[in-house]
Image (cartoon, grey):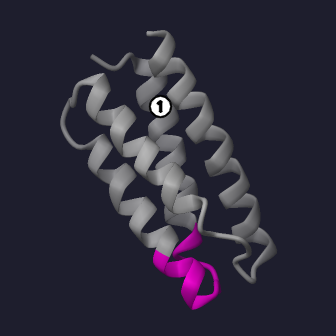
Amino acid sequence: MVDAESRDMVAELHGHLEATAELPVTTEASRWLGEAEAVVGDARRGDPPASVVAKRVEQARDLLSHVEATGSDEADEHVDAARDLVERVLERLDDG
């Protein structure tokens, strides 16, 4: 089971990824960001076990690793925040 703080962090991660969809990003970045958003959104549905959330967040980390630049300073900030949250969520779930 995922605790409330971890769920909140996953929701915040999703929010950063979702925000990039509204910004003018490169086509290449958009593809990876959209997929990462979908994967993290899947981790938020229902009440999945921690192992499922961790797997989805790890997938998002992999997808984000393909984003070098978005073409938007604001989107880059969201990507940086998302990357930080990915690591924090995974660390928290690993400790749990």
Q: Is residue 85 above or below residue 83?
A: above
Between 21 and 34, the residue placed more toward the observer is: 34
Check disc 1 and report its element: helix, strand or loop: helix
Task: Find disc 1 in the rendering and name its residue.
Answer: 8
> Is residue 22 covered in magenta?
yes
| Residue 20 point in image, percent of width and height | 58, 70
Q: Amino acid at mark 1?
A: Asp
In the image, is 84 to the left or to the right of 50?
right
Q: Residue furthest bottom?
A: 27
Which residue: 59% across, 78% down? 29
| Residue 57 point in image, percent of width and height | 43, 42
| Residue 66 point in image, percent of width and height | 59, 68
Q: Is residue 79 above or below residue 31?
A: above
In the image, is 40 to the left or to the right of 88?
left
Which residue: 38% across, 16% down? 3
Q: How many marks?
A: 1
Q: Residues within 10 Å of mark 1 (few under 14, many from 20)?
A: few
Quadrant where the image shows the C terminus: top left
In the image, is 84 to the left or to the right of 57?
right
Which residue: 47% across, 79% down? 31
Between 15 and 91, the residue placed more toward the observer is: 91
| Residue 30 point in image, percent of width and height | 53, 80
Quadrant where the image shows the N terminus: top left
Which residue: 53% across, 50% down? 61
Q: Is residue 89 above or below residue 11?
A: above
Q: Start and end of the magenta stretch?
A: 20-31
